[in-house]
Amino acid sequence: MTLKPRENKSFTLIEVLVSIIIAVIIFAALSKGMVGGGFLLKQVENKSRACGVTAAKMEEYLAKAYSALEPGTYSGDPVDYGSKPVFNWTVKVEKKWMGDDPDTVDQEGVPYNLITVDSSYDETDYKNIFHTKNIRFVNMVPYPYVHAEIKTLSSSLSVPPNSYTEIFRIKIDYEVAKDLMIIYNIAIKVKNAGGLEAANTIYTKCFVDSEGKDIETRTPIITQPLISNVVGVNNVPPGEHTVSVQWYKDTGAGDISLKEINVIVVAFEHKQS
């Protein structure tokens, strides 16, 4: 009978060393991956916080009225979440003009306020190297398409005879050409009806920059204590203007005075023909 030699199932020293080297390489790779993953999560957290700071400042400025936004650069205290980094922010408001075609030059067309919000912070990478990161949001606040001015006056002003005299005026100032709708209501009271006849009339008219508009109201003094009118004025150029309401009566008799006047001026962007 022939005996088979016993199989050797033990490890050699070389095999053990190779196994140790492979394990060290694997652990080193895993360790580096974990460190890199930690830095990646921190970067994502920082970027998320910077976006939050930027969005909050943008919302704050978008909530302002167009007229309340003054061109300039604004900044304040950094936002500190209690751990590094801190987040610095700046807001820049710029007056821009948007025309109807790409050849438009400055100060043509419709204006708007361009808002740029920047948030910056310092960050170190896994090699401990500093980097300054920046998040930027850009938005705009357009010039209002519709403006409305409402004024009320209570007075004992008497109605003059025979020629137009101003009762009320309001100043308007727009950056673009506007079409106006002017609405006014006048309540009168008769202090003394002596000498008045049924046909005696009060006339009212609207004026823009001392230029009388076509629509004129006429109301009998005795039977109609309320006067109303609606006037449309097209293509009022940019700049400051005066809207006034004037009146007179066609008789020298009686004493009629103002009780109250309400004036509403609604301005729309002029439609180009």
Image (tube, rainbow, N blue to C red):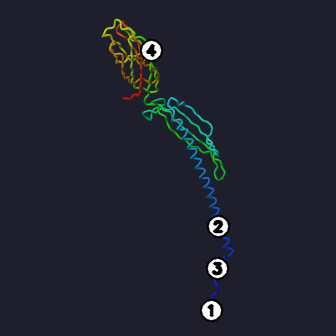
Write down the residue under mark 2: 23
Q: Is residue 81 above or below residue 188?
A: below
Front in this rendered view, residue 152 or 181 = 152
The percent position of residue 234, horizontal first and vertical second, equals: 38, 24
User: Which SS class for mark 3?
Assistant: loop
Write down the residue under mark 4: 155
Which one is in front in this view, the residue at disc 4 or the one at disc 1? 4
User: Which SS class for mark 2?
Assistant: helix
For marks 2 and 4 on the same chain, the one whose residue lies earlier in the sequence = 2
Write down the residue under mark 3: 9
Write down the residue under mark 1: 2
Residue located 40% across and 14% down the image: 246
Q: Are marks 3 and 2 in contact (CB under 8 Å)?
A: no
Quadrant for residue 151, please give it: top left
Mark 3 surroundings: few (<14), some (14-19) or many (≥20) residues within 10 A: few
Work out which quarter of the rendered image holds the C terminus and state it.
Answer: top left
User: Which SS class for mark 1?
Assistant: loop
Q: Are marks 2 and 4 in contact (CB under 8 Å)?
A: no
Residue lying at the far right of the rendered structure:
13
Type of amino acid at the residue the image marks with label 2: Ala
